[in-house]
Amino acid sequence: MNARTFLPYSGPPMDPPPVFVGGTGRSGTTVTGRLVGALEGYVVIPIELRFHTDRGGLPDVLSYRVTHERFIERLQNEWFYRELPNGETRGLHKHVDRSDLDHAIDVFRDQIHEDRVAHSSCPWSHRSCSVREPDPLWR
């Protein structure tokens, strides 16, 4: 068997992991997003979603720079529905039903708890395993 031979996966069905496509203007992100979106199990969200680009968003909660509860609060409020001065609305409500968002938040909370419990019993040094206190500037 050479390095280019792939064996078929025979385990339980799995959801594909999320893919975030980002880059500067005219760098090919639209085409890349469409290519990924054409794959089974993926959907393209054709706009920038603030929860993964704003300060205090998903990258910051995953790196412990903001609490997961603050992140959830913003998901449920300012990132879910915003009204601009001209009356136009923006936010996740255009792409996700509130009940689906609430379910995803419940799953996220459970996963965060499981991850933190697993890290609390980590055998390595406390620095590589512990949950850092969030930076007050990012709350």
Image (cartoon, helix red, strand yellow):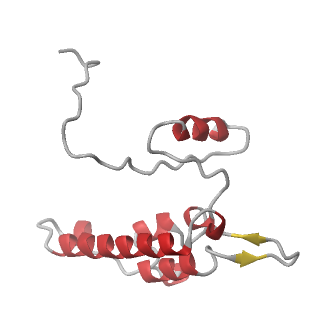
- Residue 80 occupies which quadrant of the picture? bottom right
Taking depth in this image into account, of 5 and 57 the one nearest to the observer is: 5
Residue furthest out toward the left: 123
124 versus 33 height, above or below:
below
Which residue does the image show at 55% across and 75% down from the upper left? 98
- Residue 104 occupies which quadrant of the picture? bottom left
Taking depth in this image into account, of 40 and 18 the one nearest to the observer is: 40
Residue furthest out toward the top: 2
18 versus 8 height, above or below:
below
Q: Residue 87, position in %: x, y? A: 85, 76
Q: Residue 42, position in %: x, y? A: 48, 45
Q: Residue 131, position in %: x, y? A: 30, 75
Taking depth in this image into account, of 97 and 121 the one nearest to the observer is: 97
Number of disc labels = 0
21 relative position to 46: left or right: left
Q: Residue 30, position in %: x, y? A: 66, 40
108 relative position to 96: left or right: left
Q: Split into 4 quadrants, where in the image is the N terminus?
A: top left
Which residue does the image show at 32% across and 72% down from the upper left? 112
Which residue does the image show at 52% across and 38% down from the upper left? 36
106 relative position to 29: left or right: left
